[in-house]
Amino acid sequence: MGMMEQAEGRSAVVLLSGGLDSMVCAGLAREAGYAVHALTIDYNQRHRREIEAARTIASHMGARRHVILPLDLRQFGGSALTDDIAVPKGGVDETQIPVTYVPARNLVFLSLTLAWAEALGARDVFIGVNALDYSGYPDCRPEFIAGFQQLAELATKAGAEGRPFTIHAPLQHWGKARIAAEAQRLGLDPAMSWSCYDPMPSGEACGLCDSCRLRKAGFAEAGVLDTTPYAA
């Protein structure tokens, strides 16, 4: 969770949603020398376009393997991304957890990422969460990542045998502007990634949901061109 040492050839599993944060996170893992194994969870979310973005990014990164794992969270619902609930377009409200929160999503996803890492014999897991300039999701907090790392030790054969895992969250204390600047430094085209919660039928990002607003503000603050087409 701190600075990454060089890890030439060591395998890592990267949770790759297809969003900007996960793209930059994968880029940092690759830069540090890890052999990237990318895991994308296809949870039947509203923003299906994100899955295509993850495919593009994994290919661009030269991922050793890219697993797209089906997990139909529409069966549970409870979120604007997995249920028939409108995606809010009025702006980011930092006083409450928004309806785009998917119940326990990062806990579920990190558990699957950990399971693949253990099967691979990998000790390193990467997730692109950040706790600045985000929508207030509880499963993006540093306390959650630290808690999950302890849990990983208790929950696995590898942990029981004294071979613990490191949960890397290199973007944890970054805002969107720094993430946008880092994408540019890593030579990653922003348009490879997808952030919009409610894509237009035309294929454009809506430009008005929380995720689009945070993304656009980050690129503007960083002075970096976002090559993604927005409807608004």
Image (cartoon, grey):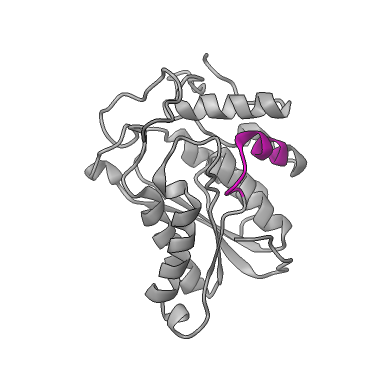
Image quadrant in which the N terminus is located: bottom right
Residue 103 seen in the figure: yes
Measuring 54% from the left and 45% from the top, which residue is drawn there?
130
Residue 226 seen in render:
no
Of residues 45 and 174, the one drawn nearer to the viewer in this rendering: 174
Task: Indicate the quadrant where residue 189 lies.
Answer: top right
Residue 37's spot in the image, x, y percent?
Answer: 56, 60
70, above or below 147, in the image: above
In-image side of 197 versus 35 (left or right): left
Question: Which residue: 68% across, 38% down?
Answer: 178
The residues colored magenta run 171-183
Which residue is the extreme one toward the left? 75
**Farthest top residue in view:** 232
Instruction: Decide: is 226 above or below 124.
Output: above
Q: Tell me what residue is drawn at x 57 percent, y 49 percent.
A: 172
Q: Position of residue 6 (x, y in %)?
A: 74, 66
Dominant SS in magenta? helix
As drawn, 91 above or below 143: above
